[in-house]
Image (cartoon, rainbow, N blue to C red):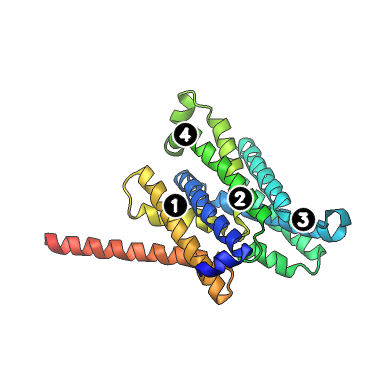
Amino acid sequence: MIDAILSYEFLQNAFAAGLIIGVIAPLLGVFIVVRRLSLIADALSHVTLAGIAGSLYLSQSVASLAMLNPLFLGIAASVGGSVLIERLRSLYKHYEELAIPIILSAGIGFGAIFISLAQGFSNDLFGYLFGSVSAVSREDLSIVAGIAVVVLAFIYFFFKELFVLSFDDEYARASGLPAKWVHFMFMIVTALVIAGSMRIVGILLVSSLMTIPVATAMRVTKSFKQTIIMSIVFGEISVITGLVTAFYFDLAPGGTIVVTSIFLLLLVIGYKKITVSLNKGAIA
Protein backbone atom coordinates (compact mmCIF):
# COMPACT_ATOMS: atom_id res chain seq x y z
CA MET A 1 0.00 0.00 0.00
CA ILE A 2 2.84 2.40 0.82
CA ASP A 3 4.38 1.76 -2.62
CA ALA A 4 1.05 2.53 -4.29
CA ILE A 5 0.69 5.81 -2.37
CA LEU A 6 4.21 6.85 -3.36
CA SER A 7 3.57 5.92 -7.00
CA TYR A 8 0.13 7.45 -7.66
CA GLU A 9 -0.72 11.10 -7.16
CA PHE A 10 -4.46 10.43 -6.76
CA LEU A 11 -3.76 8.18 -3.77
CA GLN A 12 -1.53 10.82 -2.23
CA ASN A 13 -4.32 13.36 -2.66
CA ALA A 14 -6.96 11.01 -1.23
CA PHE A 15 -4.97 9.99 1.84
CA ALA A 16 -3.76 13.53 2.57
CA ALA A 17 -7.30 14.88 2.30
CA GLY A 18 -8.61 11.95 4.35
CA LEU A 19 -6.12 12.56 7.16
CA ILE A 20 -7.11 16.23 7.28
CA ILE A 21 -10.83 15.44 7.29
CA GLY A 22 -10.24 12.81 9.98
CA VAL A 23 -9.15 15.66 12.25
CA ILE A 24 -11.50 18.53 11.47
CA ALA A 25 -14.77 16.57 11.08
CA PRO A 26 -14.72 14.88 14.54
CA LEU A 27 -13.20 18.02 16.11
CA LEU A 28 -16.15 20.11 14.99
CA GLY A 29 -18.46 17.15 15.58
CA VAL A 30 -17.81 17.24 19.34
CA PHE A 31 -19.36 20.72 19.57
CA ILE A 32 -22.19 19.68 17.21
CA VAL A 33 -23.10 16.64 19.32
CA VAL A 34 -22.82 18.43 22.67
CA ARG A 35 -25.03 21.25 21.36
CA ARG A 36 -27.53 18.69 19.99
CA LEU A 37 -27.19 20.01 16.44
CA SER A 38 -26.47 16.71 14.71
CA LEU A 39 -29.38 17.07 12.28
CA ILE A 40 -27.97 20.39 11.04
CA ALA A 41 -25.08 18.45 9.49
CA ASP A 42 -27.59 16.31 7.58
CA ALA A 43 -29.49 19.39 6.40
CA LEU A 44 -26.35 21.12 5.15
CA SER A 45 -25.12 17.97 3.43
CA HIS A 46 -28.33 17.83 1.38
CA VAL A 47 -28.01 21.50 0.52
CA THR A 48 -24.46 20.77 -0.63
CA LEU A 49 -25.87 18.00 -2.83
CA ALA A 50 -28.13 20.56 -4.52
CA GLY A 51 -25.10 22.81 -5.15
CA ILE A 52 -23.06 19.95 -6.60
CA ALA A 53 -25.90 18.75 -8.83
CA GLY A 54 -26.51 22.34 -9.97
CA SER A 55 -22.82 22.80 -10.78
CA LEU A 56 -22.69 19.56 -12.77
CA TYR A 57 -25.80 20.63 -14.68
CA LEU A 58 -24.37 24.08 -15.43
CA SER A 59 -21.10 22.55 -16.63
CA GLN A 60 -23.12 20.64 -19.22
CA SER A 61 -25.37 23.54 -20.21
CA VAL A 62 -22.88 26.43 -20.26
CA ALA A 63 -19.65 25.84 -22.17
CA SER A 64 -17.71 28.49 -20.23
CA LEU A 65 -18.47 26.64 -16.98
CA ALA A 66 -17.39 23.22 -18.20
CA MET A 67 -14.14 23.34 -16.21
CA LEU A 68 -15.71 24.73 -13.03
CA ASN A 69 -14.90 22.63 -9.95
CA PRO A 70 -18.29 21.56 -8.48
CA LEU A 71 -16.76 21.89 -5.03
CA PHE A 72 -16.99 25.70 -5.26
CA LEU A 73 -20.75 25.78 -5.85
CA GLY A 74 -21.16 23.03 -3.26
CA ILE A 75 -19.37 25.19 -0.68
CA ALA A 76 -21.45 28.23 -1.67
CA ALA A 77 -24.69 26.25 -1.32
CA SER A 78 -23.64 24.83 2.05
CA VAL A 79 -22.67 28.23 3.44
CA GLY A 80 -25.88 29.73 2.05
CA GLY A 81 -27.86 26.95 3.69
CA SER A 82 -26.23 27.65 7.06
CA VAL A 83 -27.15 31.34 6.77
CA LEU A 84 -30.76 30.48 5.89
CA ILE A 85 -31.01 28.09 8.86
CA GLU A 86 -29.94 30.90 11.18
CA ARG A 87 -32.44 33.28 9.60
CA LEU A 88 -35.28 30.78 9.98
CA ARG A 89 -34.28 30.03 13.57
CA SER A 90 -34.61 33.74 14.34
CA LEU A 91 -38.02 33.91 12.62
CA TYR A 92 -39.39 30.88 14.48
CA LYS A 93 -37.96 31.67 17.92
CA HIS A 94 -40.28 29.27 19.72
CA TYR A 95 -39.99 26.55 17.06
CA GLU A 96 -36.34 26.82 16.03
CA GLU A 97 -36.14 23.13 15.07
CA LEU A 98 -38.42 23.88 12.08
CA ALA A 99 -35.48 25.50 10.30
CA ILE A 100 -33.66 22.18 9.85
CA PRO A 101 -36.37 20.16 8.01
CA ILE A 102 -37.22 23.19 5.87
CA ILE A 103 -33.64 23.60 4.63
CA LEU A 104 -33.11 19.82 4.36
CA SER A 105 -36.25 19.50 2.23
CA ALA A 106 -35.18 22.42 0.06
CA GLY A 107 -31.79 20.78 -0.51
CA ILE A 108 -33.36 17.47 -1.52
CA GLY A 109 -35.90 19.24 -3.74
CA PHE A 110 -33.39 21.35 -5.67
CA GLY A 111 -31.00 18.40 -5.87
CA ALA A 112 -33.71 16.21 -7.41
CA ILE A 113 -34.59 18.92 -9.94
CA PHE A 114 -31.00 19.43 -11.11
CA ILE A 115 -30.38 15.66 -11.30
CA SER A 116 -33.57 15.27 -13.38
CA LEU A 117 -32.61 18.11 -15.73
CA ALA A 118 -29.10 16.83 -16.38
CA GLN A 119 -28.09 13.57 -17.97
CA GLY A 120 -24.87 11.64 -18.22
CA PHE A 121 -23.10 12.55 -14.98
CA SER A 122 -24.23 9.60 -12.86
CA ASN A 123 -20.65 8.44 -12.22
CA ASP A 124 -19.53 11.90 -11.15
CA LEU A 125 -22.56 12.30 -8.91
CA PHE A 126 -22.01 8.85 -7.35
CA GLY A 127 -18.50 9.94 -6.35
CA TYR A 128 -19.86 13.04 -4.64
CA LEU A 129 -22.61 11.08 -2.90
CA PHE A 130 -20.42 8.33 -1.45
CA GLY A 131 -16.84 9.53 -1.94
CA SER A 132 -14.15 8.44 -4.38
CA VAL A 133 -10.50 7.54 -3.86
CA SER A 134 -9.51 8.40 -7.42
CA ALA A 135 -11.45 11.66 -7.81
CA VAL A 136 -9.54 13.84 -5.32
CA SER A 137 -7.43 16.35 -7.26
CA ARG A 138 -4.66 18.65 -6.08
CA GLU A 139 -7.16 21.50 -6.24
CA ASP A 140 -9.57 19.57 -3.99
CA LEU A 141 -6.73 18.84 -1.56
CA SER A 142 -5.78 22.52 -1.47
CA ILE A 143 -9.37 23.49 -0.73
CA VAL A 144 -9.61 20.93 2.08
CA ALA A 145 -6.31 22.17 3.54
CA GLY A 146 -7.55 25.76 3.41
CA ILE A 147 -10.79 24.80 5.16
CA ALA A 148 -8.76 22.98 7.83
CA VAL A 149 -6.75 26.13 8.53
CA VAL A 150 -9.97 28.13 8.96
CA VAL A 151 -11.51 25.48 11.26
CA LEU A 152 -8.43 25.09 13.46
CA ALA A 153 -8.01 28.86 13.75
CA PHE A 154 -11.67 29.30 14.68
CA ILE A 155 -11.54 26.56 17.34
CA TYR A 156 -8.25 27.90 18.73
CA PHE A 157 -9.37 31.52 19.09
CA PHE A 158 -12.96 30.83 20.19
CA PHE A 159 -12.60 27.61 22.19
CA LYS A 160 -13.75 29.15 25.48
CA GLU A 161 -16.77 30.80 23.87
CA LEU A 162 -17.74 27.58 22.09
CA PHE A 163 -17.30 25.59 25.30
CA VAL A 164 -19.59 27.91 27.27
CA LEU A 165 -22.17 28.03 24.46
CA SER A 166 -22.17 24.24 24.23
CA PHE A 167 -23.06 23.68 27.88
CA ASP A 168 -24.92 26.84 28.97
CA ASP A 169 -26.25 29.02 26.19
CA GLU A 170 -28.23 31.29 28.54
CA TYR A 171 -25.20 31.94 30.76
CA ALA A 172 -23.10 32.75 27.68
CA ARG A 173 -25.59 35.39 26.56
CA ALA A 174 -26.02 36.81 30.08
CA SER A 175 -22.25 37.08 30.58
CA GLY A 176 -21.87 39.31 27.55
CA LEU A 177 -20.30 36.81 25.16
CA PRO A 178 -21.05 37.52 21.48
CA ALA A 179 -23.11 34.32 21.41
CA LYS A 180 -25.10 35.12 18.28
CA TRP A 181 -22.00 36.01 16.27
CA VAL A 182 -20.00 32.99 17.48
CA HIS A 183 -22.91 30.65 16.70
CA PHE A 184 -23.25 32.18 13.23
CA MET A 185 -19.54 31.65 12.54
CA PHE A 186 -19.81 28.12 13.91
CA MET A 187 -22.53 27.37 11.36
CA ILE A 188 -20.39 28.78 8.55
CA VAL A 189 -17.40 26.66 9.59
CA THR A 190 -19.63 23.56 9.84
CA ALA A 191 -20.86 24.20 6.30
CA LEU A 192 -17.27 24.47 5.05
CA VAL A 193 -16.28 21.16 6.67
CA ILE A 194 -19.29 19.35 5.23
CA ALA A 195 -18.62 20.66 1.73
CA GLY A 196 -14.89 19.97 1.96
CA SER A 197 -15.38 16.40 3.18
CA MET A 198 -17.66 15.23 0.40
CA ARG A 199 -14.92 14.10 -1.99
CA ILE A 200 -13.67 11.51 0.51
CA VAL A 201 -16.67 10.61 2.65
CA GLY A 202 -19.49 11.61 0.34
CA ILE A 203 -22.28 14.12 0.81
CA LEU A 204 -24.77 11.61 2.22
CA LEU A 205 -22.31 10.16 4.76
CA VAL A 206 -20.24 13.12 5.93
CA SER A 207 -22.48 13.80 8.94
CA SER A 208 -21.68 10.26 10.15
CA LEU A 209 -17.97 11.07 10.38
CA MET A 210 -18.83 14.14 12.42
CA THR A 211 -20.96 12.24 14.95
CA ILE A 212 -20.09 8.53 15.22
CA PRO A 213 -16.44 8.99 16.35
CA VAL A 214 -17.75 11.44 18.96
CA ALA A 215 -20.32 8.92 20.16
CA THR A 216 -17.54 6.32 20.40
CA ALA A 217 -15.23 8.67 22.32
CA MET A 218 -17.98 9.54 24.79
CA ARG A 219 -18.05 5.93 25.95
CA VAL A 220 -14.40 5.92 27.04
CA THR A 221 -13.65 9.48 28.15
CA LYS A 222 -14.42 11.54 31.24
CA SER A 223 -13.69 15.11 30.14
CA PHE A 224 -14.46 17.40 27.23
CA LYS A 225 -10.85 17.66 26.04
CA GLN A 226 -10.40 13.88 26.28
CA THR A 227 -13.52 13.51 24.13
CA ILE A 228 -12.02 15.82 21.49
CA ILE A 229 -8.73 13.89 21.41
CA MET A 230 -10.34 10.44 21.27
CA SER A 231 -12.89 11.58 18.67
CA ILE A 232 -10.02 12.58 16.39
CA VAL A 233 -8.23 9.27 17.09
CA PHE A 234 -11.34 7.24 16.21
CA GLY A 235 -11.96 9.47 13.20
CA GLU A 236 -8.44 8.92 11.86
CA ILE A 237 -8.67 5.15 12.40
CA SER A 238 -11.97 5.10 10.51
CA VAL A 239 -10.63 7.18 7.62
CA ILE A 240 -7.36 5.27 7.19
CA THR A 241 -8.98 1.85 7.49
CA GLY A 242 -11.84 2.90 5.22
CA LEU A 243 -9.57 4.28 2.51
CA VAL A 244 -7.32 1.21 2.51
CA THR A 245 -10.35 -1.08 2.31
CA ALA A 246 -11.91 1.00 -0.45
CA PHE A 247 -8.68 0.93 -2.49
CA TYR A 248 -8.16 -2.84 -2.30
CA PHE A 249 -11.78 -3.87 -2.81
CA ASP A 250 -12.78 -1.06 -5.21
CA LEU A 251 -15.53 0.24 -2.91
CA ALA A 252 -16.92 3.67 -2.17
CA PRO A 253 -14.70 5.12 0.59
CA GLY A 254 -17.60 6.86 2.28
CA GLY A 255 -19.27 3.52 2.95
CA THR A 256 -16.12 1.81 4.22
CA ILE A 257 -15.23 4.76 6.46
CA VAL A 258 -18.68 4.89 8.04
CA VAL A 259 -18.91 1.11 8.48
CA THR A 260 -15.49 1.15 10.15
CA SER A 261 -16.60 3.91 12.52
CA ILE A 262 -19.76 1.95 13.38
CA PHE A 263 -17.67 -1.18 14.01
CA LEU A 264 -15.45 0.83 16.38
CA LEU A 265 -18.53 2.13 18.19
CA LEU A 266 -19.95 -1.37 18.65
CA LEU A 267 -16.54 -2.62 19.77
CA VAL A 268 -16.27 0.08 22.43
CA ILE A 269 -19.85 -0.45 23.62
CA GLY A 270 -19.20 -4.19 23.90
CA TYR A 271 -15.94 -3.61 25.75
CA LYS A 272 -17.61 -1.25 28.23
CA LYS A 273 -20.41 -3.74 28.91
CA ILE A 274 -17.93 -6.55 29.52
CA THR A 275 -15.86 -4.31 31.80
CA VAL A 276 -18.92 -3.26 33.83
CA SER A 277 -20.04 -6.89 34.16
CA LEU A 278 -16.59 -7.99 35.36
CA ASN A 279 -16.45 -5.15 37.89
CA LYS A 280 -19.88 -6.04 39.24
CA GLY A 281 -18.81 -9.69 39.52
CA ALA A 282 -15.63 -8.72 41.36
CA ILE A 283 -17.59 -6.59 43.84
CA ALA A 284 -20.12 -9.37 44.41
- The answer to whether marks 3 and 2 mark residues whose Cβ atoms lie closer than 8 Å is no
Q: Residue at x 51, y 57 (%)?
A: 209
Q: Which residue is mark 4?
A: 169
Let me know if residue 94 appears in the view.
no
Three-letter amino acid code at disc 1? Ile
| Quarter location, residue 57 | bottom right
Name the residue type under label 2: Val
Disc 3 to disc 1, C-alpha distance = 32 Å
Q: Earlier in the sequence, mark 1 or mark 2?
A: 2
What's the residue at 55%, 65% (across, down)?
5
Of labels 4 and 1, the one closer to you: 1
Residue 70 screen position, x and y as percent: 73, 55
Q: Are marks 4 and 1 in contact (CB under 8 Å)?
A: no
29 with respect to 118 (left or right): left
Give the CA distance from mark 4 to mark 3: 38 Å
Identify the mark at residue 232; answer none if there is no mark: 1
Question: First in sequence: mark 4 or mark 1?
Answer: 4
Q: Which residue is mark 2?
A: 144
For marks 2 and 4, give the CA distance. 30 Å
In the picture of the structure, the residue carrying the numbered disc 3 is 55
Specify few, some or many for label 4: CA neighbours under 10 Å numbering under 14, 14-19, or 20 or more.
some
Q: Is residue 243 visible?
A: yes
Q: Secondary structure at mark 4?
A: helix
Query: What distance separates the C-alpha of mark 3 from that of mark 2?
Result: 19 Å
Q: Which residue does the image show at 66% across and 40% down from the upper left?
A: 83
Whether 174 is drawn above or below 205: the answer is above
x and y percentages locating residue 41 in the rendered image = 57, 51
Comes first in the chain, label 3 or label 2: 3
Instruction: Give amino acid for label 3.
Output: Ser
Which mark is first along the chain, 3 or 4?
Answer: 3
